[in-house]
Amino acid sequence: MNQHNHRFISSNRRVREDRRFVAGKGKFVADIEMSDMAHVALVAAQHPAAKILRIDGSAALAMDGVIAVLTGEELAAAVNPLMNGLDTPNVRRFPLAVGQNRYAGEWIAAVVAESRALAEDAAEKVVVETETLPFVIDPEAALESGAPAVHPEHGSNLLLDRTFDWGPVEEDFARSEEKLSLRVTWGRNSTVPIETFGVICKWDPWSEMLDVWASIQMPKYADQIARSLKIPGNAVRVHYDVDVGGSYGVKRGIKHTVLCAYLARKLGRPIRLIEDRLENMRAGDAHGPERIFDIDVAFDRDGTVRSMKMRALDNAGAYAGRAPFQLGKPIGAIVGPYQIASVQYRAMSVTTNKTVQEAVRGFGQSPTNYAIETMMDRIAEYLGMDRIELRRRNLIRADQFPYLIPSGSTYDSGDYHAVVDKVLAQADYEGLVGERDRLRAEGLCAGIGIAACLEPSGGNSSFEPLLNEKNRTSTWMEGSRINVDALGDVTVTIHTTSSGQGHETLAATVVGEILEIDPDRIRVVRPDSLGSLPGNSPVGSRMAIMLGGAAANAARNLRDQMIAIAAHAMGVEASRARYQNGTISGPDGRTVGWDEVVDIAHRRFHDLPPGTNPGLTASFIQQVPTGVALPKDGKVQMYPCYSFEFHVVLLAFDPVLARPEIRRYVIGHDCGTVINPHIVKGMTLGGIAHGIGAALLEEFAYDGEGQLMTQSFLDYLMPSSHEVPEVQIVHHCTPSPLTEFGQKGSGESGYLGAPAAISGAIHDAVRPWGVHLNKLPIRMSAVSDAIAAAEERGNRPQ
Amino acid sequence: MKVELTVNGRKAEIDVEPRVTLLDALRDELGLKGTHAGCEHGVCGACTVMVDGAAVRSCLMFAVQSDGLDIMTIEGVARADGELGIVQDAFCETHGLQCGYCTPGMIIAAQALLQRNPNPTDTEIRDAISGNICRCTGYGQIVEAIRLAARHMRESNALRAGEPAE
């Protein structure tokens, strides 16, 4: 577990995937050509809610090159509804609206033509007659009696309402010296990858096989396609060797896929649907959480936080999707990195006439961290206490691990105080405070933001059985296979697509480490789904742990086989043989080399130990460390490993213009043993950039008519190289005791704390005016308006 | 409409509808899939190519407008099969990418910068790539890559990006 003993792990090796991408030789789904391919464009709903009276595709069908017009009614008669993880059978979702649409932009019909341009032209000719219905887009309004019902058959707009009491909450509140309440809101944003979602489906009636190439990051994708289309699981072949142009959670185009698969079977041609940006923003069903937090917190005057009541009300949008579960994962780190003894948590998911949510980086953890960290800042403000001192007082201490939190998860390891100290030293915190005060003296608003938070990693799906008792899932496995061919060369398999996480580098590094051979000699391939071991795709910050674990264990198995073969050849006990750098030596100093073992395994059955199968191959399916038990009494071990991050940011802006400029950003990051430093660094920096967007810029904003206002990159603002500052990363390594090399997850790092830190910095900057800005993103206009309003009230800074 | 253009040093003739963008023509008519569509409204920069030596968004230009022009795409950047250019190599060295989707446009933008400014400051680097959105990296390792590429170019005897051989 000591990282210094590693040869390849933790060393600054190049990321092997990069070579093909810098040459423009990635293979993205839009790059795949196929003869006879037809193209899909969509007819989008104009109103947020409307009854569909009639769809007339005749004018479209009359155009040259137009092949078909498909309605929701026809599709729904042929396929099962898309998977719904909750037990809400009357909230049914199909790729195209059936009977009525539930958000503006929802797909009403699909047009298939010889080219995408033709299909778009024809889509404009489809006449849809509708009767508008009342709609609701505000989650609190949706809860009121008499609110328009988004799914009338469901009976209410509540998809989920569960209260967990990990007590004794009331007793702890009664015992505490102080209490305060706050409300903060996380605005609806998403990861918005630069590549939109795309899929190609091809049906071969002679082999009864559906081939799928997609820009996908989704667990159980092939299963979901088969279930929806009512075809056997082994009639779906997903090609995992498609590069995915960014995802960060959202690339889960199951509705696109079912639509194209149906069309491919119906029309007997390969069908391609690549979203354009408008379709992606409006109806890609890939928005992120939109959440109102109401918090009551109980604490003592010395700053000890005793108990918390949190209500999280999330606006899921028009269909359940994965949104409700994004209220579930944060249960695994509901107290953040703090020793809070009891918690009451009410998770409410409400359906409205907005675009559907999808899983977004952190799966609900970043909004929750923002709420917790804002709460900590408010307590410090209330007590007149230093924000860092307050956190230090409440952080779990290194000697308390493994640490059981009230909701049933045990944190594996950490040394939070050490990371805080390192960051403050690196940032020269005193100097930073001086710099802030100097900026203030110049007439600028300047503030320092602080955030401490956790990244639960290793992703299993414990939130599913926790929030849906009918779900009995207790594994979220990942497999890997190693073959050593007859020439002695090593090939490792991974069984999923990747979207920039460097899994090929991860697998090669880990296998190289165990087999003590240069990872650059190892080939990594991705068989299609039918040739694959079970896996769950790169979600939940899990692949370093799960693919890393699977590949390492397969490599260990392979090494043991090689030792056994060599020991037999030398006539010694396997336990007395030693493996080093691919050569096996006996106790008497004799050695058997790699090539010799390979030759025996592949050609000389007579030289194999009795009972040994020929060939040299090993597979391993990794179970989630700790992930074995179903929830009990509303408690569950959510994820196995917990990475820690601590952010310090100095931000300044002009009080009138309020354009924030980040002057300094330092993050301390402890994700245990780092497998590839380049990859972890990139994840962290990218996560911070994404967090800057969530805090200051990015929002899917709707107008009062229920129309999405931010449908292009001109309106939905993403951080450019101007908005993202240079960031300093301070490393710390507390290995996880649960994983192969002590690694934890890092795929969500940075993003999980940056919004809280930036919000905190803005609050520190506007503290002289005594205002709070309780909703993300905090827009420039909101800041300058709040300052102006405070001054009008006579609340001028001293 | 018939269009004659030079792409990566080779003459090409294509026949396209007037409404076809240069981006689509490069990808669909000429099979050059390294140039990517991101937003198709000129914001993200994923489709950046070099047109007569300047970095241009190929989604904002019609193919017919490129008649007679000299285009370089990412496929024209590598020096030979399997041999990366200096900027490409620097992106690999610092891991200035993750998913690789914005990368071709980013590398073209970097080439364009280094062609006119062999010793850019970090501010100049950030200005040069500010029209190229990357959702993966947060730009840190991209800035490092361009910084490194500039150094390698200054220290190398090789021709600078875009420098004529004569």
Image: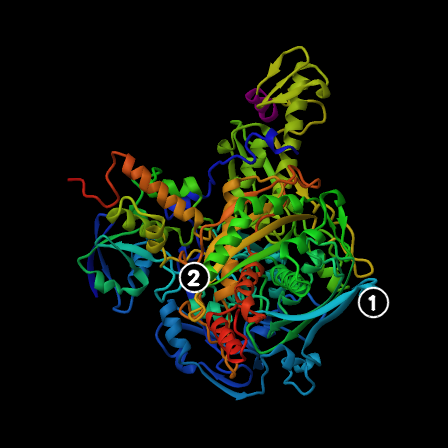
Where does the magenta region start and end? A594-603
| Chain ID at mark 1 | A
What residue would you read off at disc 2?
Answer: A442
* Front of the two marks 2 and 1: 2
Query: From the viewer's perspective, is A492 left or right of A726?
Result: right
Question: Can you give x and y, in whole percent of width and height, for residue A508 in the image?
Answer: 54, 37
Q: Quadrant of residue A301?
A: bottom right
Count of numbered badges drawn on the protein: 2
Residue lying farthest to the top in this orientation: A588
Disc 2 marks a residue whose amino acid type is: Glu
Pick whichever, A409 or A393, lies toward us: A393
Would you say the magenta stretch is mainly helix, strand or loop?
helix
x 43%, y 71%: residue:
A656
Secondary structure of residue under mark 1: helix
Residue that lies at the very extreme toward the left in this rendered image = B166
* Amino acid under disc 1: Ala
Name the residue beneath numbered marker 1.
Answer: A174
Within 10 Å of the Cα at label 1, are there few (<14), some (14-19), or many (20+) other Cα atoms?
few
